[in-house]
Image (spheres, rainbow, N blue to C red):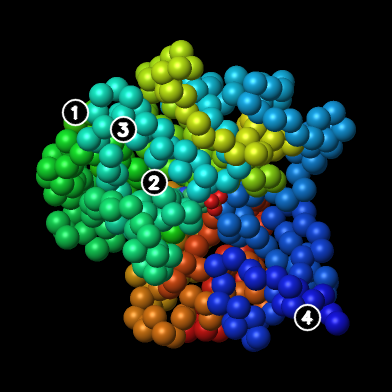
Amino acid sequence: MTLQEKDLKYIWHPCSQMKDYEKLPPIIIDHAKGVYLYDTDGNKYIDIVSSWWCNLLGHCNPRINMAVKKQIDKLEHVIFANFSHETAINLCEKLIKIIPKGLSKFNFSDNGSAAIECALKMSFQYHYQTGHSEKRRFIALSGGYHGETIGALSVGGVDLYSQIYRPLLLDTIRIDAPDCFRCPYGQCRDECDAECFEKALDTIKAHSHETCAIIAEPILQGAAGMMIYPPVYLKKLRLACTEYKIHFIADEIATGFGRTGKMFACEHAKVTPDIMCISKGLTGGYMPMAITITTEEIYDAFYADYSEGKAFMHSHTYSGNPLACSAALEVLKIFEEEPILKNAQENAVYLNNALKSVFSDFSHIGEIRHIGLINAIEITGFEPSKRIGYEIYKNALKNGLLLRPLGDVIYFNPPLSISKEEIDKAVEICIKSVKQTI
Ligand SMILES: *Cc1c(COP(=O)(O)O)cnc(C)c1O
């Protein structure tokens, strides 16, 4: 049996209709370096989606590799209740310097969805323990994505992932996310005053007595199709949360660590959330780790004599895993010592210009939107059943580019370390693949 046949014998791949694999078998990656993945047949692919938005500084980054190697010979894992280790402590000390001011308590888990569950429970329990047990619902944006566990799906708004499970989900209050491409107010993203927030505010007011938190992906709704909305919307959302005593949970899992051109997307609006979830780029894309970060004020509502029963009895076996912490700590050292963010900002402009110029006279392009190195190209005018995004993806693979789409939106979300030459190559393969398909 070939490796591919064995794979299909055993493995149920994530987010896949396995029958599709009859025509497009799994690509077995042998090794990777920088932005390139190399398969067992000798083909190479530019990983323009950062292996699901997590690889941050290139595959097999020498510095991160070394940090993890050092850690593994010292301490691979230890229980995190009542025990700790220096790498986790150093990581928090570095994180606190770069996260929005006011956030200072770190609760570790091992994937993004788990960090969201943690945030929802934390907010609920805070209100319960401060005399507001009636505040027990969540408000979330349409099109939001927060992960796949039941709580995270409940606040998510992408039907593709949640529809079937609806009978199992929490009764979430929904507000319309800004849709700047098809703005119902006829405004444009760069100049508007978030007129669309007025309607959201009505909903927030009407439900404030029963709401513990509003959760949102700041500035960029990833899974919705890399939808970008203006900072002024986020500012207004933050103000409303403060006014109506509702926590603002910022899901920075996809946007954190420079993806949008700032270290965290909340910085675009200069807001501090009450709770912030980070994962994905946190470890450079090396290890499953996430952190739910919050304020002293929320932390204090859980701090009491044991007998009062106020502790946050939430845990994950692999909380604070030292190997993951060692990767994350090295990522932050690299940010401190190398001009990663500055280079990424420069290359972001370069990439956007390159895409705009090759697609400028192309029909079927709805919008090319971008923030930081993230660029989304919305293909319009095709029936969803044509799966045009998927067809482009298959052609791009043949041409050496991993361009996994979101429906009919194809996008670039490369490692921040991508070079101009690699950008040129990726853009060239992208346009070639689109032309072969449409
Ligand atoms: C990926 C993602 C999650 C879920 O993280 P997992 O590690 O896949 O569970 C949550 N929110 C956002 C915004 C994400 O992009």
Q: Which residue is mark 4?
A: 5
Where does residue 213 sit, x and y in percent of width and height? 30, 38
**Residue 28 placement, left or right of 350:** right
Q: Which residue is mark 3?
A: 247
**Residue 328 placement, left or right of 138:** right
Q: Is residue 308 or residue 355 the one in the foreground?
A: 308
Quarter of the image with the N terminus is bottom right
Q: Amino acid at mark 4?
A: Glu
Cα distance, mark 3 to mark 4? 49 Å
Q: Which residue is mark 1?
A: 243
Q: Amino acid at mark 3?
A: His
Q: Is residue 189 or residue 154 the one in the foreground?
A: 154
Res 125 label: none
**Residue 195 placement, left or right of 327:** left
Vertical comparison of 261 with 162: above or below? above
Of mark 3 and mark 4, the one earlier in the sequence is: 4
- Does residue 142 show up? yes
Q: Amino acid at mark 2?
A: Glu
Q: Which residue is mark 2?
A: 217
**Residue 243 placement, left or right of 404:** left
